[in-house]
Image (cartoon, helix red, strand yellow):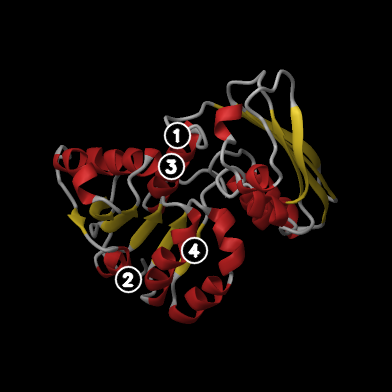
Amino acid sequence: MTGQKASHELRVAIAGLGSIGTKIATALDQGIEGMTLSAVAVRDPAKHQAFIGGLRHPPKILPIDQLGEVADIVVECAPSNHLRAIVEPVVKRGKAAVVVSVGGLLDNLDLVDLARANGGRIIVPTGALIGLDAVNAAAIGTIHSVKMVTRKPIDGLKGAPFIVQNNIDIDNLREPLKLFEGSAREAAKGFPANVNVAVALSLAGIGPDRTQIQVWADPTVTRNVHRIEVEADSARFSMGIENIPSENPKTGLITALSVIALLRKQRATLCVGT
């Protein structure tokens, strides 16, 4: 926020108070330097009244299209089909939107142009991956290939459109089953709640059509497991992470922590990592 006094607090609003949004709201309420929680938007305010009322500084409850009026940064923590309704009014006002449902961004990339035209920003947190800074750096040079293998417990994949449309029975699996192999763009359509990580990886690197991903249903794992292999002119590297699911089995605990870390960086005097 160029030209503003260092003492000025950035106002943060949150769209959605599921497993991710509640953790971010709690962290902001407990204190993130230079920030304050100004508002939230929820589908059913009565359901969240106890949580909101229990915060030290309860935020306003507003419709999603009004969050940008009372915030400098709006964090999207909602199902991906709400992404446009949340992000568009924010970037039109020249504000910043932190997008968690990054898979939904692929069908709404015109929002990037809208943000550019109005001085807004769209920020994608690292989420459930590691090493996006290395991928960003490698992409300044030439990346030859990016391959990712995702293995998830059965509960984390139930209801995915790809599984429903292809009538795949994963309930009685005794061994790992490869459900999908293809581009990150196609994976995002088939598994919108499961492969935000692959889309973030693709946007950091060589794009959603060249980034290759396999999705496995694996009854032998209890964590969301991601393995990435990158071949570039500057380096060859591989990354692995095993994320503990949150109370929402489709989402890892580290996703909310990643957003909190990103928010801390916005006003940090010492900032580590690209």
Amino acid found under the numbered disc labelled 2: Gly
- Determine which of the numbered discs, if any, sits on residue 122 in the image: 4
**Sequence-wise first label, 3 or 2:** 2
Amino acid found under the numbered disc labelled 1: Asn
**Sequence-wise first label, 3 or 1:** 1
- Residue that badge 1 annotates: 248
In the visual, does 15 lie left or right of 179?
left
Q: Where residue 63 appears, x then y in whole percent?
A: 27, 63
Amino acid found under the numbered disc labelled 4: Ile
- Residue that badge 3 annotates: 261
Mark 1 secondary-structure assignment: loop
In the visual, does 224 lie left or right of 181?
left
In space, the residues marked 2 and 4 are separated at their CA atoms by: 21 Å
Q: Where residue 92 appears, x then y in whole percent?
A: 40, 76
- Residue that badge 2 annotates: 3
In the visual, does 97 lie left or right of 168?
left
Quadrant of the image occupied by residue 240: top right
Amino acid found under the numbered disc labelled 3: Ala
Q: Nearer the viewer, residue 115 or 102?
A: 102
Please tell me whether residue 188 is drawn above or below residue 257 in the rendered image.
Answer: below
